Image (spheres, rainbow, N blue to C red):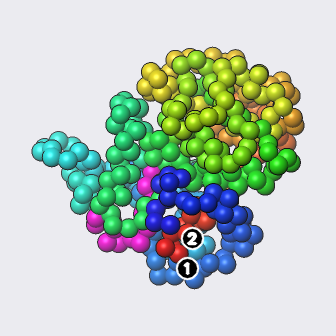
Amino acid sequence: MKHFISPDDISDVQELIREGLAQKENPFKDQQLGHQKTIGLLFFNSSLRTRLSTQKAASNLGMNVMVMNVGSDSWQLEMEDGVIMDAGKAEHIKEAAAVIGQYCDIIGVRAFAELKDREYDYREVVMEKFRQYAGVPIVNLESATRHPCQSLADLITIEELKTKARPKVVLTWAPHFKPLPQAVANSFAEWVNLTDYEFVIANPEGYDLSKDFVKNATIVHNQEEAFAGADFIYAKNWSSYEQYGQVLTQDPAWKITTEKMALTDNGKFMHCLPVRRGLKVDDAVLDSPASVVIQQAGNRVWSVQAALKKILEG
Ligand code: AN0
Ligand code: CP
């Protein structure tokens, strides 16, 4: 595997899930693979899970790890070509990515959507510039439109917990007051579409995700209807794709409650975290045995460890 930016970089999702589970079973089996190799983790945005799980996975593979918060620890980076750099940004991505590529064998990048200009965000400018100029493999630690390390961990978790060959998986929008990116939801849809699960997406009118990610998934605008008989409820807030980056509603009727979970077939509750208690989901759901969010976050180590292994193998 060359990069881990989108599912286009992988050949077989089931094989990658199996590799994640094998890493979980035996975390140090490939410790020689990363010996004397260095990974640089670049964060344009905050992180708890991605930062620590990737650091841990890389160290399990024997790698040296360097972490930098871009912009606050380093210079601020200019992404546009052909500009006269007479404002705040002191360094261009062309030099910065190429220089970091001199120090690292793999580079992980987190750069969220700005949610101002849909065309700009969906061009994946930051990830593509790193791919273009770094000269080494790039791992997507959540870009403007995708979060593959999260999605692979989500599928690993579903595979561990499913009680049916073909579980019903529901991605549901949940309320939030702040505009959040579509990346986690897009990516979850994109990866579930690589499986044979029954897949339903529930969101209010105006919140349909891009067709490029949703493909043939069933979209409903009635949450209760979606929850009926579900095996997995994956909650996430996202801002509108249609009216780009806007919060169109904060309707508390979309919050995940015990009553709604009772409509499922003993369904498990999933969320990528961080989650705002009481706003998106009731404490009673998060604190119930149905919630698998900690196991899911734990699996972030094994998902990225599987991806790093494939890259180190070339
Ligand atoms: C981010 C998002 O929604 O994309 C990161 C989630 C992993 N969440 C927040 O900004 C709260
Ligand atoms: N789920 C996830 O990516 O969490 P962080 O933003 O804390 O890394």
Magenta residue span: 97-110
Lower position in the chain sequence, tag 2 or tag 1: 1
Q: List x then y, in percent, for residue 253.
A: 70, 17
In magenta stretch: residue 3 = no
Q: Is residue 249 visible?
A: yes
Check the image and report above or below for 228 versus 109: above
Q: Is 176 displayed left or right of 66 in the figure?
A: right
Q: Is 280 displayed left or right of 283 in the figure?
A: left
Q: Residue at x 50, y 54 (%)?
A: 8
Check the image and report above or below for 48 versus 253: below
In magenta stretch: residue 106 = yes
Check the image and report above or below for 62 versus 5: below
Count of labels in the image: 2
Q: Residue at x 55, y 79 (%)?
A: 33
User: Given contact means CB atoms under 8 Å apart, are the residues at marks 2 and 1 in contact?
Assistant: yes
Q: Which mark is residue 33?
A: 1
Q: Which residue is mark 2?
A: 309
